[in-house]
Amino acid sequence: MSLLVIGCGYLGERVARDHVGRGDVVFALTRSADRARALEAIGVRPVVGDVLDPALELPTVDRVLYAVGYDRSAGPSKRSVYVDGLRNTLDRLPSGPSRLVYIGSTSVYGDMGGGWVDEETPARPITEAGRICLEAEGVLTAWADRSGVSTVVLRCAGLYGPGRIIRRDLIARGEPIPGDPDRHLSLIHVDDAARAASAALDAVAPGPLYLVGDDRPVRRREYYRVVAEALGAPPPSFVPPAPGSAEAARDVADRKVRNRRMKSELGVALQYPDVATGAPAALGRAPRPGSGPAAPS
């Protein structure tokens, strides 16, 4: 099998490595010559280009993983990258792929007052980022209708893992954390998200949409406590977020992501079923014995 990874970063590189290990031919789009050399070193065939380039040339492959994230330092707006970049890339894909897996976000959902969301929950974003993500999904759906390619959208909960622990430095310094500690966090360890992406690429007849999260969404206070304990930091404290701040915007929504369909239809077995196991592992610490039981998913 051949695979093209568009967005070979935190998540995409893990999928690329998995498929190289299987003996697949793996291409990856990158904007950087230095990054291209790093990809070659792990057995990936780099394609230097930009999703916004109207002259973008891409190889013919069997499957495509689209996992483009937003790089604030690159210049273009989030909407330009997520919507225009996706449209441009899809228009320039050679015919041939039988499957395209798109990494989306659960930010497309609104406030559920702490309740659950699943694949049947209407997407009603209340943030600009969520609206952009939903618009991008619309671009993908229109292309799939025209091309006939099997597409799978994976709406991921918050990604975390080695090198990416939410508010790590703030927790380590023992500083107050802005935000409501009783709102929920739905998260997924990056290694488990990569497993879900590979499962969606491999599935014979997958559904069009899956929510990708761990087994047990937690209240923020539990997450911060687990990370503080793993870091040997003081117990976390909290302060109300400043009006109009990014922290205040994050406090608008409270929801829990249900992963049942991902596990039953894609057969994804989580290595890190919750943050009590995943966060210490991401920090290079052993998880606490007898970490909390998983809630119904």
Image (spheres, rainbow, N blue to C red):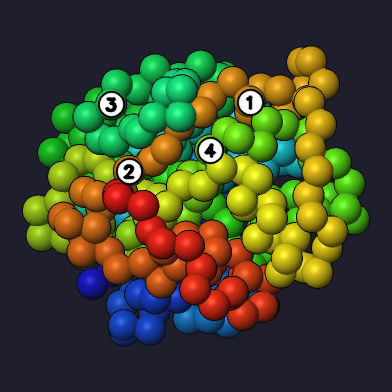
Q: Earlier in the sequence, mark 1 or mark 4?
A: 4
Q: How far apart, in angstroms, are the residues tagged by discs 3 and 2?
A: 10 Å
Depicted 157 relative to depicted 276: above or below: above
Judging from the image, what secondary structure is the residue with disc 4 in?
A: strand
- Give the numbered dot on residue 251: 1
- Give the numbered dot on residue 121: 3
Q: Between residues 236 and 104, which one lies in front from this camera angle?
A: 236
* Labels 1 and 3 touching (C-beta < 8 A): no
Q: Residue at x 77, y 15 (%)?
A: 244
Q: Residues within 10 Å of mark 4 (few under 14, many from 20)?
A: many
Residue type, label 4: His
Q: Position of residue 133 (x, y in %)?
A: 46, 29
Residue 84 seen by the camera? no
Q: Earlier in the sequence, mark 3 or mark 4?
A: 3
Judging from the image, what secondary structure is the residue with disc 2 in?
A: loop
Depicted 134 relative to depicted 35: above or below: above
Q: How far apart, in angstroms, are the residues tagged by discs 2 and 1?
A: 20 Å
Where is residue 194, by image quadrant? Answer: bottom left
Q: How far apart, in angstroms, are the residues tagged by discs 1 and 4?
A: 10 Å
Residue type, label 2: Arg
Q: Between residues 79 and 293, which one lies in front from this camera angle?
A: 293
Residue type, label 3: Thr
Judging from the image, what secondary structure is the residue with disc 1 in?
A: loop
Count up the numbered dots.
4
Q: Between residues 92 and 184, which one lies in front from this camera angle?
A: 184
Q: How far apart, in angstroms, are the residues tagged by discs 1 and 3?
A: 20 Å
Q: Position of residue 262 (x, y in %)?
A: 25, 52
Instruction: Give the mark toward the camera: 2 or 4.
Output: 4
- Give the numbered dot on residue 258: 2
Residue carrying label 4 = 184
Q: Residues within 10 Å of mark 2 (few under 14, many from 20)?
A: many
Judging from the image, what secondary structure is the residue with disc 3 in?
A: loop
